[in-house]
Image (cartoon, rainbow, N blue to C red):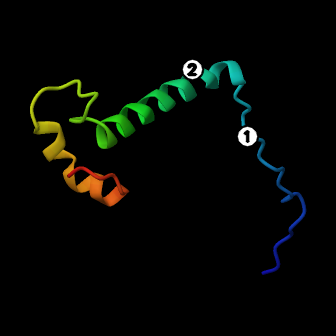
Amino acid sequence: MAQSAVGSITQPVSLPVIPLSELLPWLLFGGLLMLLAIYFVGAEQGATSIIDGRTVHEFLHDGRHLLGFPCH
């Protein structure tokens, strides 16, 4: 029951290359989303508040403390 290993050499898999011109808009979009998230967690309901009331503050309250943002 001997099996031959001839012809079982595999070629390395080449990963597709994504050009920077196609990747850049997605990186900018992700960066803007991250800045928006940091704004809402860190600064909303302060001096630069966009949304009236305390709804956003209370919704993100524990996350602020977890990330080290003072809120009261």
How packed is label 2: few (under 14 Cα within 10 Å), some, or many (20 or more)? Answer: few
Mark 2: which amino acid?
Pro
| 43 lies above or below 29 | below
Residue 40 falls left or right of residue 55 = right
Q: Nearer the viewer, residue 45 or 4?
A: 45
Q: Residue furthest bottom?
A: 1
Residue 37 falls left or right of residue 14 = left
Across and down, in percent, residue 19 comes to 72, 24
- Residue at screen point 56% across, 29% down: 27
Across and down, in percent, residue 20 comes to 70, 24
Across and down, in percent, residue 26 comes to 54, 25
- Residue at screen point 24% across, 35% down: 46
Point out which mark residue 15 bears.
1
Q: Nearer the viewer, residue 46 or 34?
A: 46
How packed is label 1: few (under 14 Cα within 10 Å), some, or many (20 or more)? Answer: few
| 19 lies above or below 16 | above
Across and down, in percent, residue 72 comes to 20, 52
Q: Nearer the viewer, residue 17 or 30?
A: 30
Residue with the mark numbered 2: 25
Q: Residue furthest right?
A: 6
Q: Quadrant of residue 18?
A: top right
- Residue at screen point 84% across, 50% down: 11
Mark 1: which amino acid?
Leu
In the picture, the quarter occupied by the N terminus is bottom right
Point out which mark residue 45 bears.
none
Label 1 near label 2: C-beta < 8 Å? no
Q: Nearer the viewer, mark 2 or mark 1?
A: 2
